[in-house]
Image (tube, rainbow, N blue to C red):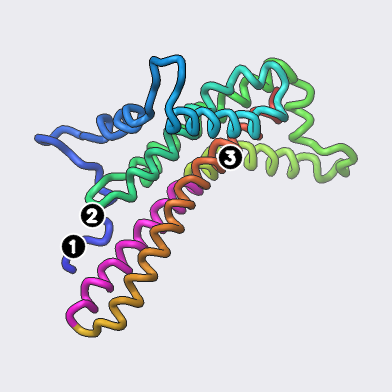
Amino acid sequence: MNENLFASFIAPTILGLPAAVLIILFPPLLIPTSKYLINNRLITTQQWLIKLTSKQMMTMHNTKGRTWSLMLLSLIIFIATTNLLGLLPHSFTPTTQLSMNLAMAIPLWAGAVIMGFRSKIKNALAHFLPQGTPTPLIPMLVIIETISLLIQPMALAVRLTANITAGHLLMHLIGSATLAMSTINLPSTLIIFTILILLTILEIAVALIQAYVFTLLVSLYLHDNT
């Protein structure tokens, strides 16, 4: 009960060295692969989910945009597995760190925007000034559109960080309440424990949904610039 509420969000160290890099590299090792001609049910289900996700995100893209398909699929798998592993007890979730989420969001956003300025410079500049804008409002609208463009990667990173962090904090609080009530009132403990189980199921869904939302928004930024 005396444990710091934010202790689980502190980056772990091994012998004084940061272990975050090892944790980030761990999820890809859990992705099963097959060397056989006929796959088992797990591999078949995995391939079906990958094809379904790829079709959902890549349908709206042209040929140039579809060259990002491997990167976007790798991104959604990485975020989803990282979020799910973070739900395990005594584990660390890298996606609760704003610095890591910014490190994912800024390069992808910048790559999409730079591609748009290189391939469709007129359309890219047209977004800064909607058609039919009154002349006195032109400077203000250009500033507003520029700011809205620049905060897109920050919005991506903050959304993912806030959702994952809020879920972990809520689970920690309800889990602490369950432990405290176990010696006081057994019926109340069962009710709180049931709420904790339902919240855990909800957090599993949130972990997958946030991975999909993050990747989908990157895909939309790419679509706007290709």
Residue 174 shown in magenta: yes
Judge whether 48 appears above or below 148 on screen: above
| Type of amino acid under label 3 | Gln
Closer to the eye: label 2 or 3: 2
Pointer 3: residues within 10 angstroms few (<14), some, or many (20+)? Answer: some
Rendered residue at 9%/35% (across/down): 15
Q: Is residue 172 left or right of residue 64?
A: left
Q: Which residue is pictured at 53% across the width and 42% down the height?
A: 156
**Residue type indicated by callout 2:** Ala
Q: Which residues are magenta?
A: 158-183
Mark 3 = which residue?
152
Q: Which label was assigned to residue 7? A: 2
Place of residue 19 in the rendered image (x, y in percent of width and height, measured from the top left): 21, 34
Label 1: few (<14), some (14–19) or many (≥20) C-alpha neighbours in 10 Å: few
**The disc labelled 1 sits on which kind of residue?**
Glu
Residue in view at x 58 percent, y 34 percent: 53
- Coordinates of residue 46 in the picture (x, y in percent): 48, 31
- Which element carries disc 3, helix, strand or loop? helix
Quarter of the image for the N terminus: give it. Answer: bottom left
Q: Are marks 1 and 2 in contact (CB under 8 Å)?
A: yes
> In the rendered view of the protein, which quadrant contains the C terminus?
top right
Q: Nearer the viewer, residue 87 or 4?
A: 87
Residue linked to disc 1: 3
First reached walking from the N terminus: tag 2 or tag 3: 2
Indicate whether residue 94 is drawn in magenta.
no
Decide which of 37, 182 is in the foreground and name it: 37
